[in-house]
Image (tube, rainbow, N blue to C red):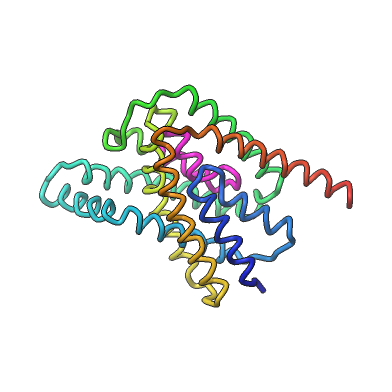
Amino acid sequence: MMNIFQAVLLGVIQGLTELLPISSSAHLTIIPWIFNWNIPESFDVALHFGTLLAIGLYFFKDWLGLIKGGFNYVVKKEKTVQGRMFWYIVLATIPGGAIGFLLDHFLSGTLNRPIIIALALIIMGIILYVVDKKAPSKVKYEQMTLKQTFLIGVSQALAFIPGVSRSGITITTARMMKIERESAARYSFMLSAPIVLAATIFKFKDFVFNLPFVVGVLTSFIVGLLVIKFLLKFLQKGSFKGFAIYRIIFGLLIIIISIMWRKLV
């Protein structure tokens, strides 16, 4: 049975790694593996719900504007930036959600191996580093096109592979299309909300509402809020270089630990 310490630690890890492009699924798989913890899959989804709440609260006014704009875009034919971005997010969610669901259905549980997670961390870390370094920052959030948002949505399907990272793959794809760093992160956060909400609803029946559950969700929510504020401010002048390097180091560390444990066995 999971205890309070495990819930707090995993909540902190989720809050940090879900919103930074370093893969929460990798960390939430590897940490319990190292310590031999048995963590139910529903708790993983619950932790994602905590960061979803953080996104919802931090961008509350943005979401109200998007929903209102989306409604007026169709009903009143008012073509505003918010209305356009609302429908872009809706359309971009469909392919990523559908492809991800199908792949997860057929390959669920087969990719949670440390070596696969390590390789995904390293490969995506290298791609993120190169893309972020080479791509200019020309396109702002409100200037994004349907093609750009749709391709970012399609790329989100790869997030079902532990180690790829939902924010990592969507931010990398956005940077490939010359979208500026802060705008790439902002759109990545907004795009993640519908799929995480759908996963929460789907797994809700499996939730166990005990004290560790509540503590874990609350922790991921609080840490998530702090991380969103930090990242958006940091990216006004900073880059994704440090996150890319961390991914590579973490991936190499997983490989080393796996080799050592095999030798011990």
146 displayed left or right of 262: left
Is 17 situated above or below 181? below
Quarter of the rendering occupied by the N terminus: bottom right
* Residue at (56% x, 51% y) in the render: 24
* Residue at (65% x, 54% y) in the render: 29
Q: Which stretch is magenta?
A: 152-174
- Corner quadrant of residue 120: top right
Furthest toward the left, the residue is: 76
* Residue at (48% x, 34% y) in the render: 172
Is 2 situated above or below 20? below
Q: Tell me where residue 81 appears, x and y as whole percent.
A: 21, 41
* Residue at (57% x, 72% y) in the render: 212
Furthest toward the bottom, the residue is: 210
For the image, the number of numbered tags is: 0
Q: Tell me where residue 247 appears, x and y as whole percent.
A: 61, 39
214 displayed left or right of 67: right
Report the predominant secondary structure element of the magenta stretch. Answer: helix
Is 69 situated above or below 137? below
Q: Tell me where residue 39 appears, x and y as whole percent.
A: 64, 65
95 displayed left or right of 30: left
Q: Tell me where residue 232 appears, x and y as whole percent.
A: 40, 42
Is 68 situated above or below 21? below
Q: Nearer the viewer, residue 135 or 110?
A: 135
70 displayed left or right of 123: left
Q: Nearer the viewer, residue 229 or 132?
A: 229
**Residue 84 within the segment the image draws in magenta:** no
